[in-house]
Amino acid sequence: MSTLAPARTRVRPSFSISVDRHKVAISVLIAVTLIALLAPVLAPDNPLVPVDQPFLQPFTLAHLLGTDSVGRDVLSRVLLGVRSSWLSAIAVILFGVVIGGTVGMIAGVSSDRIDSLLMRITDGFLAFPGPVLAIAVVASLGASLFHTLIAVAIVWWPLYARIVRGEARAIMSRPHIEAARTFNVGGFRLAMRHVLPGVVPAIIVTASLDVGNLVITLSGLSFLGLGAPAPAPELGAMAARNLQYLLQQWWVCVMPALAIAIMAIISNFAGDALRDFGSRGQ
């Protein structure tokens, strides 16, 4: 009587898949950032100057995404629009991480009284709706991308303050913090050496997800006319100003909108991959 040998199953570790997604996410974010930084070099034509006639040409080898209503190269304008949206989103995030992270760290490692005071101030800023504040700032200071960034940054940093404060509070209850306190470790050293390393992963994941959210937010405000005035190549404004050509020369307004969607998808993919990698590594 013959015996059947058990079939061998090849188990592929899921952690390697997570690591691969993590590497791809970082690579994609770096690639988009490089494209944004090098957009003036990559753009085939000046995005502000008409390059050809007749206007509203479809896709050609000379103009891969066609031309707009005044003869400007759409590809060049989209590349510069990606630069503006992506780098503006990163600037708001950096402001939020620095200001919000500092406030959240102080609240997380300080006494309950200081924590309560800082969080009530944070809640006060969270009460301001971003688009309404942006409209008010632009109405008082004038239409400008810089003014829009100021308005969005004011309402964005409290989100990072909340996240950092929550992570810091959780870390402060762990045994190694109690051990450090028994050796009379100072508050600043405790925060920098024992709390901050545990907070950084949450900040990275949140920031990677926020790039897409900010790209959409800033593009929406630009769509409403709250960004840089014409003829600045901003994706939201480009889509808004060319809606009249949607049914005939659709590429003029669809291509900027498609660039916004791609950046948002890339950011969400990268954030999800980094979050999964962090949760598997814990």
Image: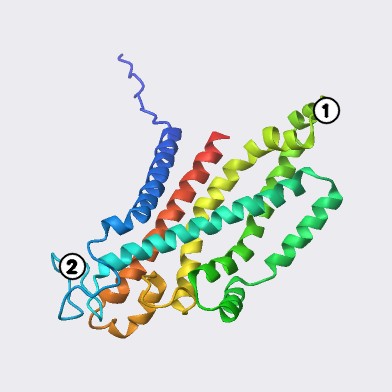
Q: Position of residue 12 (x, y in %)?
A: 39, 31
Any mark on residue 63, and which?
A: 2
Q: Is residue 263 above or below residue 190?
A: below
Element under label 1?
loop
Q: Is residue 280 above or below residue 165?
A: above
Question: Going by the image, does 273 lie left or right of 120?
Answer: left
Q: Residue furthest right?
A: 113
Residue positioned 60% across, 71% down in the render: 130
In-front residue for pair 198/78: 78
Residue under label 1, please give it: 184
Q: Are marks 2 and 1 in contact (CB under 8 Å)?
A: no
Q: Position of residue 188 (x, y in %)?
A: 75, 37
The residues tagged by marks 2 and 1 sit, at their Cα atoms, a distance apart of 67 Å
Q: Amino acid at mark 1?
A: Asn
In-front residue for pair 19/31: 31
Question: Going by the image, does 66 lie left or right of 210?
Answer: left
